[in-house]
Image (cartoon, rainbow, N blue to C red):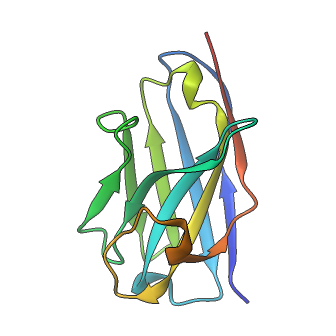
């Protein structure tokens, strides 16, 4: 059974930083691309960032490019999202997800992912 557990969310002032972690189990983590998505209140879930299975390729939403960094430690079965220069509009529940395909390039499409974490709340105050 695949499980993804996010942590690291919280309340931060605008301009601050947070690092989210997503610990995976139940699948050979190093074979799968991983993604981060977020959902703000009253809005649809949006793509944030994704990493290929090796970490050698990454994609970012335009809204976070240059401020967020996705990385992974395959030895620890963990993917990270470093979030710097946070803005109030970054407030959302953040979800990690694992791609359904092995050895794939990172994807921004939700339907590429088959397992999701429970989410962690990030709140950025102005």
In the image: residue 73, left or right of residue 46 = left
Is residue 120 positioned above or below 105 on the image? above
Q: In the orientation shown, which residue stands out farthest toward the left?
A: 56
Is residue 121 positioned above or below 16 on the image? below
x, y percentage for residue 117?
A: 69, 65
Q: Residue at 40% of width from left, 61% of height from top? A: 50
x, y percentage for residue 124?
A: 62, 22
Q: Residue at 76% of width from left, 60% of height from top? A: 118
Identify the image quadrant of the N terminus.
Answer: bottom right
**Foreground residue, 39 or 51?**
39
**Foreground residue, 47 or 79?**
47
Q: Quadrant of residue 40?
A: top right
How many badges with numbers are in the image?
0
Q: Residue at 56% of width from left, 30% of height from top? A: 90
Is residue 122 positioned above or below 93 on the image? above
In the image: residue 116, left or right of residue 80 = right
x, y percentage for residue 49?
A: 42, 53
**Foreground residue, 60 or 123?**
60
In the image: residue 6, left or right of residue 107 = right
Is residue 102 positioned above or below 19 on the image? below
Identify the image quadrant of the C terminus.
Answer: top right
Q: Quadrant of residue 9?
A: top right
x, y percentage for residue 4?
A: 67, 70
Q: Residue at 48% of width from left, 63% of height from top? A: 35
């Amino acid at each position: 059974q695949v499980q993804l557990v996010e942590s690291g969310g919280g309340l931060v002032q605008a301009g601050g930083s947070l690092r989210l972690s997503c610990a995976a189990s139940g699948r050979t983590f190093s074979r799968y691309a991983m993604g981060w998505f977020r959902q703000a209140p009253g809005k649809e879930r949006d793509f944030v960032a994704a990493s290929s299975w090796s970490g050698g390729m990454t994609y970012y939403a335009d809204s976070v490019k240059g401020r967020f960094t996705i990385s992974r430690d395959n030895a620890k079965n963990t993917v990270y999202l470093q979030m710097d220069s946070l803005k109030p509009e970054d407030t959302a529940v953040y979800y990690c997800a694992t791609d359904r395909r092995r050895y794939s390039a990172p994807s921004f499409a939700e339907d590429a992912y088959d397992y999701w974490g429970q989410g962690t709340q990030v709140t950025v105050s102005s």
